[in-house]
Image (tube, helix red, strand yellow):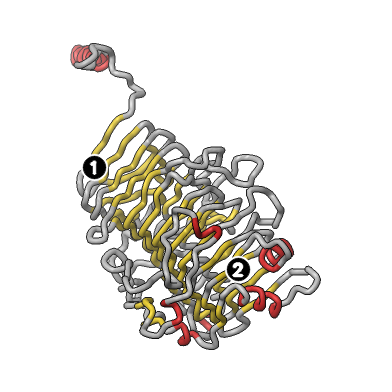
Amino acid sequence: MKSLKFKTLILALVVFSVSCKKNSETNQPVDPNAKQTLTLQNGAVISGVYKNTILNVPEGSFVLKGYVYFEDGSELNIAAGATIKSDVSDKGALIIERGAKINAMGTAAKPIVFTSGKAVGQRLPGDWGGIIILGKAPTNRTTEPTIEGGVGKNFGGTVSNDNSGTLKYVRIEFAGIAAQPNSEINGLTLGGVGSGTTIEYVQTVYANDDAFEIFGGTVNAKYLVAYATADDDFDFDFGYTGRIQFGVALRDPSFIDAGDAGNGVECDNDATGTNATPLTRPVLSNFTLIGPNVDNTASKNHNFANRFRRATNFVLNNSVLIGWMKGGLSLESDGTYSSLVGASPTSQFRNNLLHANTASYRIGSVTVTGASATALQTAVESNATVTLTAAADAKLTDPFNLTNPNLLPATGSPALTGAAFAGDMTNAFFTSTTYCGAFGTTNWMSGWTSFNFPRGANGY
């Protein structure tokens, strides 16, 4: 009994001491709700919910365990050269909520890598969740939507220039898990992210769903690479109106979502094709979308280079789209078709090189009088798009090499010229180029991307 009383007294003194601790500069009690700063040691585990916290992750190796949330006011800072591996048994996902920030600042020499916690040769798509960033920028939903993936968090608002931080020189490998049917975490999911956010030089590798999916918002991005995606490489929805320049998709013919058709770009205004505003209208330039270019059983669900549907508008200019087996440009609603081919077009498909092994131009569920694939082809070819007879006619150096691709135009390539920057393309965000596609004479993927993922007996 004496021992117990003594321990109780000591505990009381400790609690009293902590509660009465003063700030040495202001001589005021420390606010228990004040933001704290934590710096991890190499090998640490990142887990749980971070509230009023600045978490610094230095160069080194770290473990992401389970769904990890950074709440409003918190900040995650990741240094160049950091590698974050998901726990194998408790699959990780990183959720940056509205009002929080992520600053993942890699370099070409020291990219930041998010990947599977399994050993090399055993890694598989879907080994962990992925990265979700949520912001306060507008969507076309009347109430705040909940992001898919089972994380239970809302996104969107009225702050067009909302800033969720920076992703730069980042690789996201083997991500993508489904919480339930049609509710997946993608490689990188952005919900209502604003134009104050910086996203540049980001590669996804073997994403088990979409590589990049953007729900509403106004975020802009440059230098995005989707490598070997199961579903869509770039997916837009819920009133996204941002700009993206220099985008790459390279498909693995033997890897595809067995339950869904994978496209280079898939774009909807919303799931039911309403005219809710703002209308989804991504403004895209200088994309190089490389399809599987192989027609076999394993590749049957590889779909179209571009699938614009459900009342969406769009701009896709100055791009190279080759090797797609089922179609090149597919328009699949009256509103979408009329926005490009109608009397007062609000969509654009200009200055592109397009090849598909079957049906370069397609329409579906379109009842507009006079609508046809031929009318669509005539409309886009009148705006300097060239329909190629074969993928080789683009004259890219080595576009279908999965482990060491070279997407630069070769000597004599039509992609070396033909780009135009007028109208939507005059925005200061865009870098004016003379070439079409993501590359001229410089390979900006060098150093920080990786394509060396040979399949072993048990995985990659």
Q: Nearer the viewer, residue 273 or 329?
A: 329
Which residue is at a point 33% across and 28% down the rendered structure image?
Answer: 35
Query: Which class describes the residues within 10 Å of circle 1: few (<14), some (14-19), or many (20+)?
Result: some
Query: Which amino acid does the dot numbered 1 rest on?
Result: Leu
Taking 411 as reference, is 219 above or below it? above
Residue 446 circle label: none
Q: Measuring 54% from the left and 65% from the top, which residue is drawn there?
A: 316
Whichever of labels 2 and 1 marks the residue nearer the N terminus, that label is: 1
> Residue 87 at what x, y percent from top left?
34, 54
* Residue 377 screen position, x and y as percent: 65, 78
Which amino acid lies under the numbered mark 2 shown in the image of this protein?
Arg
- In the displayed structure, 291 sits above or below 95; it is below
Image position of 303 with respect to 39: above or below: below
Query: Residue 251 appears at what percent x and percent y?
Result: 45, 74
Instruction: Find out whether the residues at labels 2 and 1 contact each other: C-beta distance under 8 Å.
Output: no
Q: Name the element at disc 2.
A: strand
Q: Is residue 444 left or right of residue 245?
A: left
Q: Quadrant of the C terminus?
A: bottom left
**Residue located beneath label 2 in the image:** 307
| Residue of label 1 | 40
Q: Is residue 391 visible?
A: yes
Choose between 245 and 299: the one closer to the eye.
Answer: 245
Q: Give the answer, above or below, for where 25 lies relative to 311.
A: above
Image coordinates for residue 258, horizontal then vertical, percent = 54, 72
